[in-house]
Image (spheres, grey):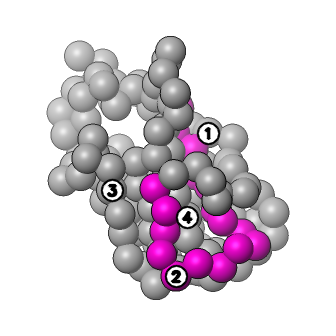
Amino acid sequence: VQLQASGGGLVQSGGSLRLSCAPSGFFLNGYPIGWFRQAPGKEREAISCISMNGNPSYSNSVKGRFTISRDKNAVYLEMISVTPDDTAVYYCATTYPDVRTGCPLAEPPYNYWGQGTLVTVSS
């Protein structure tokens, strides 16, 4: 079971970016997927998740600016109006093999994590 996060890079403040999370070794649509980020010197925080039924949740820090979606191949995080405070390593994770109807915005019970993709927002 693996997750591959991609799409990070350097973007100017106010710009947009789209991250992708692609799975291998399990059926993506059967499990919640979460997006987390860790800024320099800070703890990792949960920012968004999507349930197996496609219902999204967002933290207050990204609500209204980030949109999570999924198809059979990957989970995406569309980021708009980014600011330097969005600079971080972004991780995706899955609760596999735990089946859940909702999606928790917290590290437990996510069991498998991608390697992270770096997003840098310049001012």
Residue ID for mark 2: 101
Select label 1 or label 4 by which is in front: 4
Please give left or right for residue 116 compared with residue 40 in the image: right
Instruction: Please give the label number shown on residue 81.
Output: none
- Residue found at x 24% / y 52%: 63
Mark 4 surroundings within 10 Å by alpha-carbon count, few (fewer than 14), some (14 through 19), many (20 or more): many
Q: Of helix, strand and loop, which one carries label 3?
A: strand
Q: Of helix, strand and loop, which one carries label 2?
A: loop
Residue ID for mark 1: 116
Q: Is residue 70 magenta?
A: no
Which badge, 1 or 4, is on the more N-terminal residue?
Answer: 4
Magenta residues (range)? 89-105
Select label 2 or label 1 by which is in front: 2
Between residue 62 and residue 13, name the one nearer to us: 62
Q: Give the amino acid type for the residue marked by disc 4 in the picture.
A: Ile
Q: Give the amino acid type for the residue marked by disc 1 in the picture.
A: Gly
Q: Give the amino acid type for the residue marked by disc 3 in the picture.
A: Tyr
Asked whether disc 2 touches disc 4, contact meaning CB atoms under 8 Å apart, the reply is: no
Most common SS among magenta residues:
loop
Give the CA distance from mark 4 to mark 3.
12 Å
Give the CA distance from mark 1 to mark 4.
14 Å
Q: Of helix, strand and loop, which one carries label 4?
A: strand
Residue ID for mark 4: 33
Give the CA distance from mark 3 to mark 1.
19 Å
